[in-house]
Amino acid sequence: MSKPVVVSSTIESVQVFRRGATVVRRAVLEGAVLDDGVPPLIELAGLPMSLTDPTVRVAVLDVLPTTARVMATGVQVGIHVRPGLPPETAPAQREIDEVAKHIGELDELMRLIDNELGLLTGIPVPDRPDAEDGRAPPPAPLAMRLALETFVDDAAEGRRLERRRLQHQVRELSLQHAALVERVRAASTAAEVKREDVSKSIIVPLLTEGHPTRVVVEVRYIVPGARWAPAYHVKLARDGSSAVIHQRAHIAQRTGEDWTGVRLKLSTATPLRYGELPELSSVRIGKAQPPPMKVGFRPPPKGGTALFADHDRDRQRALSLVPPPATWSLPRLQAPSLQSTASFGESSSRAAKKSKTMSIDREELAASARQVSFDDDSLSDGEMMIDVVKEQSISAPSPRRAMAPPAPAPPAMRSERPSAMSAAMPAKSALARGGPGAAGLDEVVDAIVFPLLRLPGPDDHARGRLVPTDTRRLYRESAERFGRPLPFDVAQLANSAEHEAMNAGGAVPPLCLNLEDISSNFDFAYEADGVVDVVADGGWHSVPLGDRQCEASVRYVTVPREELAVYRVAVIQNALGAPMLAGPAEISVGGEYVLTTQLPTVVARGELTLGLGVEQAIKVARNARFKEVREGEGVVAMVEMVHDIDVNIVNHLGRTIDIEVRERVPTASAGAEVQVSEREVKPAWDAYDQEERGEVIDGGRRWRVSVDAGASQALTARYVLRLFSNAEVQGGNRRER
C-alpha cells in the first residue's frame, strides 16, 4: 500500500444535537497536490480523539473538469502523529568525555596551587637574633627579611592569579559540558510523542479517471461532548405593532476541536437513535388466515461458498504452474513444536516425523474449522459467532493448501458454549435481532458495532463472513507507521477523550431548558443566519442565530375588583417556522430594557404572551352599589339583592387602546336555594373561565373594548341574587364592596 498524502481540511458546518454533534469537513485537492495526478490515498489529519469511528462518511462533491471522475472507494479511521521538529545532531560521547577530562585536569592543577599556597603562607620570616650576655645585640638582617617577604608575596600572588584563571576555565568548560549533556537529552527525547501530538485521521482511497484539476472531498462524522440550550431577546416596538425575536443559543462543547467560522444548525434530535419504518398491513379478501410469524433476523443465503469457486479454481491452476521450492531438512529438534504448521520436506530424523505429524493434525483442525465456517445452511447465529472466534485462533494455511477441498466437520467442533465475543457484547444487543424481550432495547449499540465488522479476503478462513476488527490493534498499527514511540496507550487515550467530552457543560445555565427532558414525537432544527465561533473548552458560550420579524400587538388587562392597576400584555406571533422552546428572554420596549423572564414553549405559528408591567397612563375606577328588595309580605316571600357595578376607564395615551376588563359574578352551588341572574350589562361582556392559565374559575366575565386616545369609557353591569326571605347567603348577602 502506498503512503497516503496528508491534505488539510477545514470545518464547514456543524449540527449540534441534544448531546453530540455532526461535523462536516471539506478538503480541496488542487495545485501542487495534483501535479502527479490525484493521489490514490489521502489522509485528513488533526481530527479529535473523541470521534465516533463508525459514523465517518466520505463523499466526493466536486470534480473539475467535469469530464474527469473521482470516486472514494472506502474509508478507514486511524491515528496520526504530528511530526516534531527535526532534532539536532547529538554530540558524540567522546566529545563529552574530553571536556570532562579537561575539567578534571584543571581541578587537579588548582589543587596543586592550593598546596603551594599553603606551603608559601607557612614560610616564617626570621626574627631579629637575640644578643649574647654582656654584648650588644647584633645588627638586624633587614634586607634578608624584606627579600624573603617579597619572594613569598610575589610567589603567592602569582599562584592566586593562576588559580583564578584556571577557575574561569573550569566554569566555562562546565557550562560547555552541561550544554552537551542537554543536547544529548534533547536528542534522546525528541522522538517522544506527547498527547497533544496524537489525533485521529481518516484515510480515503480514491479511484480516478481522467486528469482532474480540482477535487473537493467532504467528510462527516459524529463527536460526543456538545450540548445547546435556547435563549432569546425580544425587541418590541414602542407602539407594540411589531417585534423582533433575536434568537440565541448557549452552546458547550468539548469535542477536541474549536469551531471557527462554521455554519451552525441546532437540532432537538438524537444523533444515534434506532428507528423502524412503519409496517403497512395488507387488506385480504377471502377466508381469514392467521398472520405469518415474524422472523427476528434473516439467515445467510444458501450456497455462499459457491461464490469463491472460480477464485479457487483459477488460483489452483496458477499455483500448479509455479515450480515447487527446493526441499531441505529440518535441523535437529528436541521436541515437536505446535508452531510448525507445514512440512518443509522429507527428513529421516524422528523429530522431523513428529513435526510433520503435528502439522497434519493442525491442518485437519483448520480444515474442520473451515468446514464449520462454510456450512452456513445449518448454523445458528450463536454458532456463527463461535466459529469466528475459533477461526481467529488458528493460523492461516499456506496458499497451496488453502485450495484443498474442506474435510467433513466432526460433530465435536459444533460447540454450544458461549463465545468470547458474545460474552463481551451486551445481552440487549443480541436480543435486538428479534429474540424475546427485544422491545424497548437500545439498538444503537448494534448500529455502532456493525460498521466495525470487516469482510475478509478470499484466502482467509472466514471468507464470506463478517468478522469483528480489533480497534486497539488498528490504532497501534496506524501509529507505528510514523516511527515515533508512543509512551501511552492510544486506545486508552481515545476512551479518555470520549469520557471527557461526555462531561461537557455540566448543568445548563439559569432559566435554560435541558433538551434531554423534552419528550416529543417530532424533532426540529434551527439554523444560524451567519457563521459562529465556539471554543472547545467545555464551558457555555452564547452565540447569535439570527433575527426574526414578527407581528405583534399590545393589549391591556385590568381586574378592578382586585386591583385598579392596568397591565400591558404583548401578543407576539411565532415566526420561527418551528416551536419556540422554553428559555430565558430579555424583553425590551422601544430599545429600553424592561425585564428578564423565562418564556414558555410556543408552538409553530402560535402566540406568545408577555406581561410588560403596569401602564401608568391608563386610569381605571370601579364603584359598586347594593340594594335589597323584598317581594310580598308573606312568610315565604322572595328577596332580591341587586348589585350594580360601574367601571370607568380613562386613556391618557396618544393612541387607541384595546383593553380587557375582567369581572366575576357569584354562582350558585348545586342544590342551593338561590338564583343568580345578570341584567343590564353595557356593553355586553363574555364568559371567561381563564382556561389558558390552567386554573378554571366559575362566574368569570370580561369586557373587551377600545378606548380612543384621550377618551373615557364607562362599563356597567347588574346582577341579582334571588332567594327566600328567611334565608341568607353564606358570608353575607352583599357580594360587592
Image (tube, grey):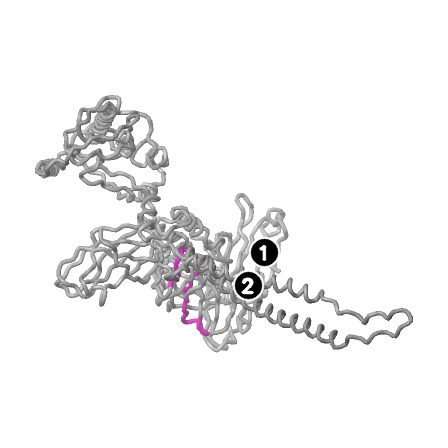
Instruction: Check the image and report above or below for 277 versus 531.
Output: above
Q: Residue furthest right?
A: 134
Residue 514 or residue 654, whichever sits in front = 514
Q: Which amino acid type is shown beneath numbered disc 1? A: Met
- Residue 19 is left or right of residue 621, and the answer is left
Quadrant of residue 305 within the rendered picture: top left
Between 9 and 723, the residue placed more toward the observer is 9
Where residue 576 appears, as percent x and y from the top left, is 36, 62
Q: Quadrant of residue 29?
A: bottom left
For label 1, the residue is 641
The stretch of residues the image draws in magenta is 236-259
In the foreground, 198 or 590: 198
Answer yes or no: is residue 433 visible: yes
The structure residue drawn at horizontal position 38% and vertical position 54%, both measured from the top left corner, is 198
Percent of width and height locating residue 80:
33, 54
Which picture quadrant has residue 530? bottom left
> Where does residue 676 sit, x and y in percent of width and height?
53, 53
Number of residues whose C-alpha sits closer than 10 Å to that of mark 1, classed few (under 14), some (14–19) or many (20 or more): some
Could you say which disc has been placed on residue 106 in the image?
2
Quadrant holding the C terminus: bottom right
User: Three-letter amino acid code at disc 2?
Assistant: Leu
Looking at the image, tell me whether mark 2 or mark 1 is earlier in sequence order: 2
Q: Is 346 in front, or is 56?
A: 346
Q: Are marks 2 and 1 in contact (CB under 8 Å)?
A: no
- Asked whether, in this view, residue 301 is left or right of residue 475, the answer is left
* C-alpha distance separating marks 2 and 1: 124 Å
Mark nearer the viewer, 2 or 1? 2
Q: Position of residue 396 (x, y in %)?
A: 23, 35
Query: Under tag 1, what secondary structure?
Result: strand
Residue 126 circle label:
none
